Each structure stands twice: as structure tokens, then as C-alpha cells.
């Protein structure tokens, strides 16, 4: 079982840059999350795929009908936190409050209590081992915040790259990476997916499947939006943020056509049935 996951956030929810709009300005900006999310929903429907949506609590508060529609179409609703803040910057207490607020927003929007969580920017790192305990204490059952590779922000280089159960009972599902010359490289999501040539992307994914490793893919609605407003981020960050937008949906279609996909809840059931 491979998992197709979507981080439900908007074009201005960028991390680790002073150029991004501040939280207090978000409600004044043009939102594009509904249109982009529905484009992904249509594509998923076309391929009969049900995915996991990690919903930002702020989005759930403002677009409850969108969250309800996602759930009604058979997709899993999980939490992406509330205010899209880096876990290693806000600390344990603020992390707990952000979790609670996101859970409340999702429950109010769709009458669903999320069981899964993904940190913004994969910002559960070696510096925040307490985050997994907070997740368990707040009733979450699984996490997909570990990015077992070096990143500009977040990431847990050297972490187990395969799904595992943590000592506190949380199931961890790291983002797919590949081992190249002794280092792990992300390729199956976000800017990595947009930058990677399609032929290389499919080759790496097939290699991972042949090793009986589940593919864990992630994408943001903005990754398919060529018309989104552009923020002046400087040359390098702009390249990482906006490269490959035009061809991203084509890569999504190729991946949907080439592999079998499901939700995290499906992978958990399959793993449980296999005796894990």
C-alpha cells in the first residue's frame, strides 16, 4: 500500500522566511486553496484514489465546507496543525495548544477527530523528541512528520526511513527518500517532485516499490498552481518554491497511473493485518 497525502494549505503559508505574509494578514489575502484542492480531488476521483488530507486548522475554520466535501468524497482528514508554525521554534507548550486548536477546528468543520498529524515543514526534528509524546497525550495515533534527510528547515537526517512504531505507541510514517551515495534524498513531494524529471521520479518510485517499501507522497495545492501570486523570496528560495509548477500535475497523473495509492488509515489496516 502506498499513500497519497496532501497538505491542505494556501499559497502564502510559506515557512522560514520573513518575506511571507504574517499570520495577522492571512485573512486579507486572495485564497486559492479551494480551487486547487478541487483540482486535485477531481484528479484523484478520475483514478479512483482516496488520499489523506493533512488539514491546516486555519483553513478548516475558514473553509469548513471544503473539509466536509473532502471527507464526504472518501478521503481521510488528518491535522497539519493550526497556524503553520515550525515545531522546533514554538516549543512544547505552544505545540500542544496548536494541536488542540487544530483538532477543534477540524472537529467543528467536519465532525471528525483526526488521528494523524504532520508537522509544518517536517519540523519535528532531533531537537524535539518531546513532540511525539505530546501527540500521544493528545490522542493522535500516527504521525508523518519525519523527513529522514537534510532539508533547508526541518528534517531528521539519519532517522529510520521506513514506517515504524515508536515506544509510546505512535506509528511513524516517514516521507519517501532514496539512498544515493550514502545520503538520503527526498524526491516524492513538494519542490523535490516539481524539480525531479518525470522519468527519474518514476524510476526511483519503482525501485522503492521493488524493495517492498511503501511510497509516502506529499503535495501542496500550491504545487500545481501556475497562476498563484508570487512572493519576492530571493533567487534561491524562489527557485525552490516556484520551479516546476507547470509540469507538476502531469507528474501527479503519471504517479497515479503507475502505482496503487490509498490513505494512511488503509496502510495502517494493511500493516496490522500483516502482524506488525
Image (cartoon, helix red, strand yellow):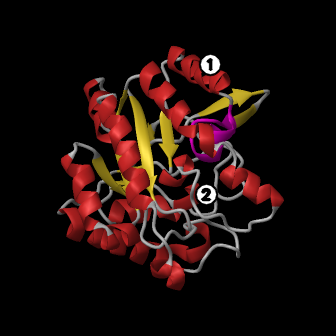
27 or 157: which is nearer to us? 27
83 to 234, vertically: above or below: below
Residue receiving disc 1: 203
Real-space Cα separation, disc 2 to disc 1, in angstroms: 29 Å
Picture residue at 47% right of the left edge, 29% below the top? 253
Labels 2 and 1: the sequence-earlier one = 2
216 or 160: which is nearer to us? 216
Residue 113: x and y, percent?
23, 60
Instruction: Please identify the residue farthest to the right as the structure is shown.
Output: 235
Picture residue at 77% right of the left edge, 30% below the top? 182
Residue receiving disc 2: 125
Residue 105: x and y, percent?
29, 71
Q: Secondary structure at mark 1?
A: helix
Q: Is residue 169 visible?
A: no
Residue 128: x and y, percent?
57, 63
Say left or right for 166 vs 113.
right
14 or 266: which is nearer to us? 14
Picture residue at 43% right of the left edge, 22% below the top? 257
Q: Find out whether residue 188 is within the magenta segment.
A: yes
Q: Is residue 229 visible?
A: yes
- What is the quadrant of the C terminus in the image? top left
Q: Secondary structure at mark 2?
A: loop
Classed neighbour count for the residue bearing mark 2: other residues with Cα under 10 Å, few (<14), some (14–19), many (≥20): many
Q: Nearer the viewer, mark 2 or mark 1?
A: 1
Q: Find out whether residue 32 is within the magenta segment.
A: no
Looking at the rendering, the stretch of residues picked out in magenta corresponds to: 185-196
251 to 27, vertically: above or below: above
Classed neighbour count for the residue bearing mark 1: other residues with Cα under 10 Å, few (<14), some (14–19), many (≥20): few
Residue 212: x and y, percent?
48, 19
- Do the numbered discs 2 and 1 sit on residues whose CB atoms are within 8 Å? no
Picture residue at 48% right of the left edge, 52% below the top? 221
Q: Which image quadrant for residue 27?
A: bottom left
Amino acid at each position: 500500500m502506498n499513500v497519497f497525502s496532501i497538505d491542505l494549505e494556501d499559497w502564502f503559508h510559506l515557512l522560514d522566511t520573513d518575506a511571507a505574509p504574517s499570520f495577522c494578514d492571512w485573512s486579507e489575502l486572495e485564497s486559492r486553496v479551494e480551487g486547487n484542492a478541487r483540482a486535485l480531488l477531481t484528479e484523484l476521483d478520475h483514478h479512483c484514489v482516496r488520499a489523506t488530507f493533512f488539514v491546516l486548522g486555519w483553513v478548516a475554520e475558514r473553509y469548513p465546507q471544503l473539509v466536509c466535501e473532502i471527507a464526504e468524497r472518501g478521503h481521510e482528514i488528518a491535522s497539519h496543525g493550526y497556524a503553520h508554525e515550525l515545531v522546533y521554534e514554538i516549543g512544547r507548550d505552544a505545540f500542544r495548544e496548536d494541536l488542540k486548536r487544530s483538532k477543534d477546528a477540524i472537529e467543528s468543520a467536519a465532525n471528525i477527530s483526526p488521528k494523524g498529524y504532520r508537522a509544518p515543514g517536517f519540523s519535528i526534528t532531533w531537537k524535539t523528541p518531546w513532540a511525539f509524546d505530546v501527540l500521544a497525550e493528545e490522542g493522535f495515533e500516527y504521525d508523518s512528520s519525519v523527513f529522514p534527510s537534510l532539508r533547508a528547515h526541518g528534517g531528521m537526517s539519519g532517522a529510520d526511513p521506513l514506517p515504524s512504531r515508536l515506544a509510546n505507541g505512535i506509528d511513524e510514517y516517514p516521507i519517501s527518500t532514496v539512498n544515493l551515495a550514502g545520503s538520503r534524498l527526498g524526491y516524492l513531494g513538494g519542490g523535490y517532485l516539481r524539480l525531479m524529471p518525470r522519468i527519474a521520479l518514476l524510476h526511483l518510485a519503482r525501485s522503492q516499490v521493488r524493495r517492498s517499501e511503501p511510497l509516502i507522497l506529499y503535495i501542496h495545492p500550491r504545487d500545481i498552481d501556475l497562476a498563484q501570486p508570487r512572493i519576492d523570496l530571493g533567487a534561491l528560495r524562489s527557485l525552490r518554491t516556484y520551479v516546476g509548477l507547470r509540469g507538476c500535475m502531469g507528474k501527479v497523473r503519471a504517479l497515479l497511473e503507475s502505482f496503487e495509492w490509498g490513505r494512511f488509515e488503509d496502510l495502517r489496516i494493511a500493516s496490522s493485518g500483516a502482524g506488525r
